[in-house]
Amino acid sequence: MKKALGIDIGGTKICYGIVNEEGKKLSEIKKTSTPKTIQEIINTLKTIILDNYDNIDVIGVSSAGAVNIENTKVVSSTPNLPLGYNSIDFSTLSNKKVFVENDANCAVVAEAIIGAGKGYDTVLMVTIGTGIGGGVYSKGQLFRGSTGNALEVGSMKIFADKRQKCTCGRYDCWESYASGTGLKNCAINGALNYSEFKTSILKNKKPNEITTYDITDGVEKKDAFSMKVFDQWIEYMFVGLVNLTDIFNPDCIVISGGMCNFIDVKQLEEKINNESVVSNVSVKIAETQNEAGMIGAALMALK
């Protein structure tokens, strides 16, 4: 059985390990800090590959950013990585095959093959973090679009009248409402407009000082303001998910990221199925979690 070295490059750390064709981890998962310059990143990746060279057949790399159709370079801006990161040609890092793919795409592959989406025909995965990433894996294939940049779901507009500016510079992107950043935005708006804020456990905070942790903690303590803010955030998440369900007709939606553990997936599943015009969908929490990118990259390189 062939083996791949999976490498997941993040803004703060690089994690890597050896994975077989069934998605089984064959080595300890190791981590190292992400270097601050392009040359240091290249040197680090070459060292990681060399250290594992005799035990692998191919190398799979998971990275933030849009990837070219040849799976050799990251072609979009990656603000959490050094300037010039998109100049790296990953195929030159080794004389063994090196395959690079967007981290959200890698994650949906991992979840569809060995995770919460295993056994389903079409899996839509949405990662809720500071922003929102997405991917679709259908009938054994990753959907990439014409240039490999499909499923930038966080950039989907949900209003047309310029209500709220997104960090990307545009207005009303889904992630400015339904991501972790979106929850903070909901809290700021709520503090300015909800009467419940006057009696909230957070009432002594300035609106822009309220954190996502404050809201999730407030929900656990049954704070009326926090629960109203959280319900609004879930509604924004629902709007995006039901739209994506109607477009892609998945039979499984997998949600991952730091915010997923606060979501009642069964309630969200029922709400989506009541509203969607296509067949019913199951909503699940991701199982591979922080290793999804690494495992998915390895599996794609092996394919």
Image: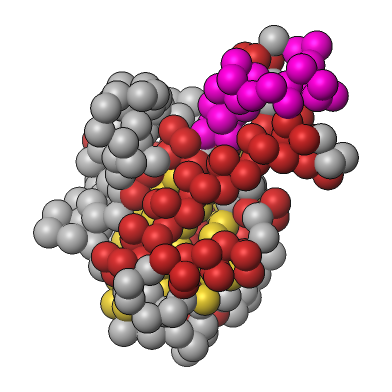
Residue at figure coordinates x 56%, y 41% from the top left: 233
Q: Is residue 128 left or right of residue 221?
A: left
Q: Main secondary structure of the magenta part?
A: helix
Residue at figure coordinates x 72%, y 40% from the top left: 227
Quarter location, residue 94: bottom left
Q: Look at the image and tell me in which quarter the C terminus lies.
A: bottom left
Residue 65 vs 126, above or below: the answer is above
Can residue 184 be seen here? The reply is yes
Residue at figure coordinates x 57%, y 62% from the top left: 268
What is the residue that sits farthest to the front in this orientation? 195
Range covered by the magenta-colored residues? 181-205
* Residue nearest the viewer, comparing 120 with 110: 120
Q: Position of residue 47 (x, y in %)?
A: 49, 48
The number of numbered badges drawn on the structure is: 0
Q: Is residue 233 magenta?
A: no
Q: Is residue 251 left or right of residue 209?
A: left
What is the residue that sits farthest to the left in this orientation? 146
Q: Position of residue 191 (x, y in %)?
A: 65, 19
Coloring applied to the structure: secondary structure
* Residue nearest the viewer, comparing 303 with 154: 154
Can residue 168 be seen here? The reply is no
Q: Position of residue 141 (x, y in %)?
A: 29, 77
Residue at figure coordinates x 55%, y 70% from the top left: 270
Q: Position of residue 26 (x, y in %)?
A: 62, 75
